[in-house]
Image (cartoon, coloured by chain):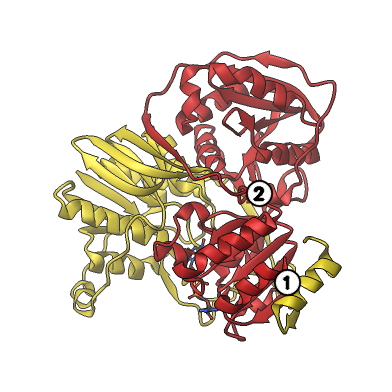
Chain colours: A yellow, B red
Amino acid sequence: MKILVPIKRVIDPSFKVRLKPDHSGLDMAYMRMVMNPYDEAALEAALQLKEQGLATQVLTVSCGTDDCLETLRTALAMGADEALLVEARYAMSPLVVARLLKAVAVREGCGLVLIGRQGMGNDGNQVGAMLAALLGWPCLPFAETLTIEGTNVRTRCKTDHGSEVLEATLPTLVVVEIGLAAPRYVSMPNLMKVKKQKIPAVAAETLGVDMEMGVAVVQLRSPPERSRGVMLPDAATLIERLRTETRII
Amino acid sequence: MAILVLAEHVDGRLEETTHSAVTAARLLGRDVHVLVMACETQGETLSQQAASIEGVTRVWSVAAPHLETQLTEDMAAQAQALLERGGYRYALMSSSYKGKRVMPYLAALRNTDLVTDLTKIEGEDTFVRPVYAGSLLVVERLKSAVKLLSIRASAFPPSGSQTPAAPIETWEALPPRCAVRCLERRRKSALRPKLSRARIVIGCGLGVEKKDMPDIEKLADKLGAAIGVTRAVVEEGIATSDYLLGQTGKIIAPELYIAIGISGAVQHLAGIKDSKVIVAVNKDPSAPIFQIADYGIVGDVGEIVPALIELV
Ligand SMILES: Cc1cc2nc3c(=O)[nH]c(=O)nc-3n(C[C@H](O)[C@H](O)[C@H](O)COP(=O)(O)OP(=O)(O)OC[C@H]3O[C@@H](n4cnc5c(N)ncnc54)[C@H](O)[C@@H]3O)c2cc1C
């Protein structure tokens, strides 16, 4: 079985994002780009399934500009068997990305999709569930554990009040929580090994999907900042101030 | 043209997120319908609860045994059937875990994009939502004729109640999809007030060690507070992710948030930034949490927490 792991290239979550002075977009100066941490967890889970003999191939795919090749290369260095770039020069809506991923999953004959629950930054939480719906595959959302027995995929999934154990029959899509698998360290020798590896690319327009976007970004804004409050010397002063100024306690 | 709200419920009670979704719906128009999908034993009471929410004009009640498990595929197909009937301009739900799986699935069934986790409605097709863990806001415009949305419940105060209640109509359940089987459900212990509802929440970070937890619980009990934690605490195995606050966990807006031993990473702040009052206790005076706290104390957990217990 071939596992598809979609990978998004995102701004390193430890960097503080800012708007350009004219608010026309993000100030990308000094930003470092990394693999979306949620997708990293998904890739690690896929690699572990392969090591357990439960999958034969791990295919990673990224939709975007050729900057994504660097991220895909990291995926290869982690141990992915194949990488594919679906090339597009502009940011696509979640539904368009889901359509492209569906085309890849079908074309490549994948039997399982492991996908991070959200792209760090855009924080949309959309593509996974959309892709499941488009493929007509069961959706196992917010998985914190994952086991496969025969053709049964079983996950413990986060819910609003705790968790539930869900099971589905392959082919299936699993939306991955950050805690599902701690990604392995990418060693320098492994990175060197894949440095020259050619990564195939297909133009998004050639996959035969509708590229029409149903949502448009009108503007980016900075939220109102919370202002810094006061420092207090001790617990007694804190309780006193909370009682008199906020009346919450 | 009407607005359809997908109801959320647990243990035979509507969740407050549904009341918040109704509030958002009322900002979009006057004809607000609520779709209640439940098992047969709960359908009627839940529908009555929905009909009594202020501003609701009609309740669609769909009851069938398989709806007990609230699976994505069944809920989305059922909502899609109702939308296909026509007459709706919007369909919305809160961006809870349930909303995060059902709404995008429904959007793909309808072949439309959607806006998730919005915090503000700026116009009939224009919505604001936080991105980059709340560091920025993006304004998005939706093109589709029927617009699908999920709303951040803490940004919309829950609607009150009304008499007389709105009319309830039953709508036929579709056959179960049977794509996913639910084998077990685990609820986190309900000893304390729920994180999403508590007036006061104590957040524990890595600065709180396991030995400090009894004191934290004592303080929480005295304040009637819920307890939440950071990702680092979950990774240490001190708490499960049920209690996680932040980008990957719960997003809350209590009246008072007390951050104890928390550094203040953006991913954590994403979940608590909208609290009315924020208190931070940290031994490091340069901890970023102090930049957004209304009241800060530089001090050790082991000293400040016992002192607080004595004082409240
Ligand atoms: C993809 C992704 C998603 C994430 N999602 C989340 C999320 O949803 N929620 C979340 O919380 N984090 C999340 N994180 C992690 C986040 O970046 C931080 O690592 C985390 O919030 C730090 O937790 P902390 O403040 O408890 O620990 P630390 O950053 O280690 O801070 C501990 C603090 O305790 C103080 N301290 C230590 N000892 C004492 C003492 N005795 N008395 C007083 N103070 C003391 C220290 O000065 C320090 O400031 C995410 C990260 C990534 C990459």
Question: Could you tell me if residue A23 is visible in this image?
Answer: yes
Check whether the beta carbons of the residues at disc 2 and disc 1 lie within 8 A of each other: no
Residue lying at 73% horizontally and 36% vertically, measured from the top left: B22
Up the image or down, A38 lies above or below A168; here it is below
Q: Position of residue B229 (x, y in %)?
A: 53, 62
Q: Quadrant of the N terminus of chain B?
A: top right
Tag of residue B239: none
For residue B244, above or below residue B39: below
Q: Which residue sits at x=46%, y=55%? A: B241
Residue ranking furthest to the left: A53
Q: Give the SS element for disc 2.
A: loop
Q: From the viewer's perspective, is B24 left or right of B79? A: right
Name the residue carrying label 1: A225
Number of marks present in the image shown: 2
Crowding near the residue tagged with mark 2, few <14, some 14–19, many ≥20 C-alpha atoms within 10 Å = many
Percent of width and height locating residue B44: 64, 17
**Residue ID at (44%, 73%):** A33
Q: Is residue A227 among what the camera can see?
A: no
Up the image or down, B232 lies above or below B182; here it is below
Percent coordinates x, y for residue A164 in the rendering? 41, 39
Q: Which residue is mark 2?
A: B152
Residue B131 pos. (x, y %): 60, 61
| Callout 1 amino acid | Glu
Q: Quadrant of the C terminus of chain B?
A: bottom right
Disc 1 crowd rating (10 Å Cα; few below 14, some 14-19, many 20+) is few
Badge 1 residue CB within 8 Å of ligand 1: no
B296 or A96: which is nearer to us?
B296
- Along the viewing direction, whichever of B277 and B174 lies nearer the viewer: B277
Q: Is the same chain shared between marks 2 and 1?
A: no
Secondary structure beneath disc 1? loop
